Amino acid sequence: MHSKLIALAVLAALPAWAEEASPDALAVQRAYAEVFKKVSPAIVSLDIDLEAREKPKSRAQRLQDMMTPAALREYYKRPEGPVSGVIVGKDGYILTTYYAVDGTVHGIQVHLADGRTLDGKLLGRDQALDLALVKVDAKGLPTLEPADVSKVRVGEFVMIVGRSPDPERANMTAGIVSADGRNSNTAIQTDAEIDYGNIGGALVDLDGRIVGIAAQLSTQEYGLNSGVGFVTRWDCVERTLPDLKAGKVVTRPPSPFLGVQAAEGALEVEGAQIDQVLPDSAAEKAGLRSGDVIREFQGEKIKEWEDLSKLIHLCKPGDEVKLVVRRGDTDIEIEAVLGERK
Amino acid sequence: MNRVWMASLVILLSSIPARADDPVAAARGVEAAVERIVDKVVPAFVFIGGGSGVCISEDGWFVTNFHVVNSPQGIIKRWRVKTPDGNSWLAEVVGTDTRGDIALVKMKEAKDRPHVDLGDSDLMETGEYVIAVGNPFLLGRPDCRPTVSLGIVSANHRCEGSFDSPKNLQGYLDCIQTDAAVNPGNSGGPLFNMKGELVGINGSISPRFGNRVNTGIGYAIPSNQIKRFIPTLKEGKGNMHGVVDGLTMLPKESAGDGATVGRVKPGSDAEKAGFEKDDLIVEVQGMPTPTLARWWGVVWTWPAGETLAFKVKRGDKTIDVSAKLSPLDEEEKAKQKPYLGLRMETSEDGGIVVQGVSPESPAAKAGVQSGDVIKSIDGKEVKDAGALLKVVGEHKTGDKIKLKVTREGKEIEVEVTLEARK
C-alpha cells in the first residue's frame, strides 16, 4: 500500500517534471531527430566510377597545388568521391546530381541504408536541373512523401539528409528556406549547409516530406557552402522524372560568363562599376579589379550594369571580348576570354 | 484495487502536456514565429548597388553600409534603388559615417513605405535567434526577392577592429557576431531579433583563405550605435566619431577590471573633466568596460559632441567623471573652412579697409584693427576683399598667413592663425 502511494505521488509530480524537461527548444531538437529517423532510410550513397576529367597529377604537383590560393578555393568545388542520392521510386529509382555523373561513367555502386550494395545503371539526366537518375534492381524500397512545394514559405525550417562519405551513417544539416523561385523558378534557396556530405540528398520539412533534391546548380558560385545553397524543387523533379526514366539526356547550352558582381543603380557612374571579381573567372584572368568601371564592351557604350549583362548574354563561352575600363583616372583596354557558367 | 491504480496512472500520464508528445508541433510553432517576422520585415528591404539596405521610416529614410555607397572615385551620392514590391526609387545619400561604416540615404517621393523600428541591440544575448535579410551574390536581382537566413547571436559587443592608437581606429569596435549566413551582397542589410526589430546592420564577415564567403562568422553594426548617429547623419556632416581630447589610455590589456588611463594632457578636456593618470575606468555610460577593447567599443558608439559619463576607480575611491567627446579627426577639423573674422570694404585708391573685427576671431587674436588697410596676403598684393577671401579659402584651418597692413601711416605685418567658425 505504501509503495503504491509513493508511486502515485511520483506520478503526480510527473506533469510538472515533464513541463520543465520539454520547453520548445528541446522539442525542436527532438523534431529534427524524428525527421532524421524517418527520412534516412530513403537516402543512399553512390560510388561513381567517373573517368577523370583532367590528366591525373603527380603527388608532388598535387601537394604544390594545395598551397596555391586557387587550390584553396577548390575547397568549395565539387569533390570527387561518394555522393548522396534519394530513392524516388520503390522499384529502385534513385536520383542524384548531374555533375556527379558528368563524363564517362564506368560503373555505379549504390549503398542502401539496409546495408546492401547494388549495381546502378545510369538512365536519364538533366543538366539545368542538376539531376541524374540511376536504376538498381530492387523492390519495395522506402521512399519519401512529397511536400506541397507551392506552399513553401520563406523562413520554413528545413533539413538536408545525405549519406556521404560513410554509407553506413546518414547525416543532416538544418536551416531555413531563404528564398523561393531561384534559377528561373527551378530552385529553392536554403541556408542549411549543402556540402560534400549531402549533395544529391533530400531537402525535407518538419514532417519529413521531400521539398527538393540538394543539388548545386552551379560549380562556379563559391557561396554554395557558405549558407547559400540551392535545391531543385520537387515539383520540377516530378515533371522531369518520366523523361529521366525514359533515358533522356538534357544538356544546357553553355552560358557565357565573365565573373563580375557589379553595383546596380549608381546614377553618377557612367558604366558598370565592379564590386567583386569572382575567383578563377574570365574577369580575374583578364586582370579586372574591384572598383573598375566597365564603360565599353565590344565597342558598345555601357551606361549601367544591365547593358553589360545583356551584351554578355549575346556572346558565347570562349569569345574574345574587348572592354574599356576606367581605373582611377584613366581608361584602359582589357581583353577577356569569356568563360562558361556551369 | 489494481484497476483503480491503473486508471490513476493513465489519468496522470495523460496530463503530461501534449507538447512533449508532439515535438513537430512545437517546432512548427517556432517556425511560424520566424515566418511571421519574415512577412513583416522583408517589405522594408532595399536593394542598393551591390548590397542591401533597410527602410526605417514611412517617408523612405533607409540605412546601409558606407562601403556600399563608396567607390574608389569617392562616395556615389545618387542611386536608383529597388524594393521587394518591384518598385524602383531615386535615392540620395544624405549622411555618411565613414569610420562607423553607415550611410543614411533618402528615397525621393516616398510615402507610406513599409519600415522597421530600431531595437535595443544591448539586450541581444548569446544564443538568441536573429534573422538576416540581404542580397548575397546578388541572387535577388532578377525578381527583387531578397535572401533570408537564420542564425543566433554568437557574441554581443564583439570588437572586430583595431584600436592600437587613436590615429589608427578602424573596423567595428562594437558589433554583434552571428552565424546567420551573410555573404558579399548582404552588406548594409538588416539583422532582426525575434520581435522583428532592427538590431544590427550586417557589414563584415571573417573570410577563409581570402575567399570572401561566409564561414559562420558575420559582424553587424549595432542598432544602438546607429540610433545615436542618425541626427548627425541627417545633417549630412562628415566624420563623427569622437575621443576624449587629451586622454591617452594604456595600450596594454588590464586584468579585466577596467581600462587604465596612461596619460592626461595638461590643459586638455580630459584634465578639465577630472581624469588623472592611472585612473581605472570601469564604466562608460552605464556599460561595464572591463577591458580596453570594451572602452573603445562604448566610446565608439557615441557621436562627437556627446557628453559621456565615466565611472573611475582611483585608489579606493569611485569617482564619476563626465567629458565631452571631441571630433576624432584633426583632418576633419581642418576640412572645415577657415575664416578671418573681418568686415571689409575696398577703398578707391586700392587696398582693403577693415570696417570691423569680430571678437575672438582669428583676426582679432592676431591684432588686426578697424581702420587697417590690408595691402597684401602672403606676399601677394590684393586689391579687393573678394581676392583676399579667395586666398584665405585656399588655406586650411590651422594655417598661418601673413597680412601686410597700413595702420596710421605705418606698415605692419600681422600673422593670423586661421580657425574654423565655431
Image (cartoon, coloured by chain):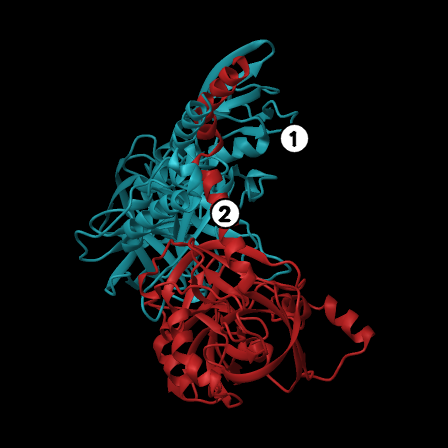
Can see residue B345? yes
Decide which of tag 2 and tag 1 comes sooner along the chain.
2
| Residue labelled with disc 1 | B253
| Residue labelled with disc 2 | B219
Nearer-the-camera pick, A115 or B229 = A115
The vertical placement of B258 against A295, above or below, is above
Q: Which residue lies furthest to the top in this view?
A: B316
| Left or right of residue B169: residue A164 | right
Three-letter code, disc 2: Tyr
- Quick one: which chain is red? A
State the image coordinates of residue A207 (x, y, percent, origin top left). 42, 54
Residues marked 2 and 1, same chain: yes
The vertical placement of A320 against A6, above or below, is below
Q: In which quarter of the image is residue B81?
A: bottom left
State the image coordinates of residue B138 (x, y, percent, origin top left). 41, 66
The residue tagged with tag 2: helix, strand or loop?
A: strand
Colour seen for chain B: cyan
Badge 2 sits on which subunit?
Answer: B
Badge 1 sits on which subunit?
Answer: B
